[in-house]
Image (spheres, grey):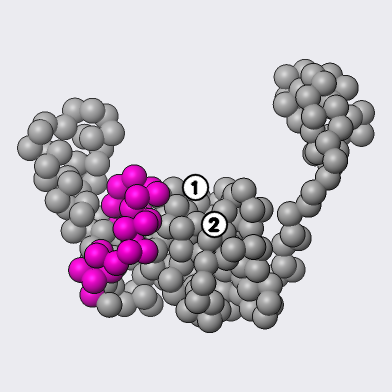
């Protein structure tokens, strides 16, 4: 598909709607998720927990992963590892197959000008003209990523790690300190919840 075709597709629009804007990170997440699903021969979003996605970043791309795979925090099949890498792993519980896509070094080489503009925006010192220039560059970059050959963006490898456990349902118990209901497996042996442990 060309970048324009993806941009106009229903599923990409859903990603943009969920995330709030189009950006290079969202495009990368989109490419990773679509490629991962193809690799696992999964056609449909996960309605239950048959797919598992692991994200190693909490940046923009993670939102596209949730929309496309249907793996979500609430279902317990979207797992966050705070590694600071644009890397995503997808598993099928049905087949036991897994694949990890990790962004290649220099795959996203932003120009010095683009970086300068990003810094001006973040520090709130950009002029209206610079904002406009930034928007155009950012959009162009997002479109470039939609079209780049996938192996220029990511290294792709089979993975086999123990499949994460399915979400557990436990009957809550009261924390001995705050009295709020808590999953017993998340409390310490004195039945004190983690937020109370952090405060004491
Ligand atoms: Zn974004
Ligand atoms: Zn507590």
Residue 164, above or below 124: below
Residue 48, picture quadrant: bottom right
Residue 96, above or below 116: below
The spot of residue 17 in percent (x, y) is: 35, 50
- Which residue bears the numbered disc 2? 55
- Which residue lies at the image location 74% right of the left edge and 59% below the top edge? 166
Q: Which residues are magenta?
A: 2-26
Q: Which mark is on residue 58? A: 1
Left or right of 162: which side holds 55?
left
Left or right of 190: which side holds 199?
left
Residue 90, picture quadrant: bottom right
What type of secondary structure mainly makes up the magenta span?
helix
- Which residue lies at the image location 54% right of the left edge and 57% below the top edge? 55
Asked if residue 19 can be seen in this view, the reply is yes
**Which element is circle 1 on?**
loop
| Mark 1 touches mark 2? (CB < 8 Å) | yes
Disc 2, ligand 1: is the CB inside 8 Å? Answer: no
């Amino acid at each position: 598909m060309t970048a324009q075709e993806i941009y106009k597709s229903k599923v990409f629009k859903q990603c943009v709607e969920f995330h709030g804007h189009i950006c290079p990170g969202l495009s990368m997440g989109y490419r990773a998720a679509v490629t991962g699903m193809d690799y696992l021969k999964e056609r449909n979003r996960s309605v239950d927990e048959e797919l598992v996605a692991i994200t190693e970043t909490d940046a923009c791309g993670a939102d596209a992963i949730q929309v496309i795979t249907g793996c979500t925090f609430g279902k317990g099949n979207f797992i966050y590892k705070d590694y600071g890498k644009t890397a995503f792993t997808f598993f099928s519980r049905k087949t036991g197959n897994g694949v990890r896509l990790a962004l290649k070094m220099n795959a996203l080489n932003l120009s010095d000008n683009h970086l300068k503009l990003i810094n001006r925006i973040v520090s709130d010192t950009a002029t209206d003209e610079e904002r406009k220039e930034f928007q155009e560059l950012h959009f162009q970059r997002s479109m470039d990523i939609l079209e780049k050959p996938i192996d220029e963006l990511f290294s792709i490898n089979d993975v086999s790690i123990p499949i994460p456990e399915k979400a557990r349902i436990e009957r809550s118990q009261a924390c001995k300190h705050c009295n709020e209901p808590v999953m017993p497996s998340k409390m310490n042996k004195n039945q004190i919840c983690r937020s109370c442990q952090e405060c004491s």
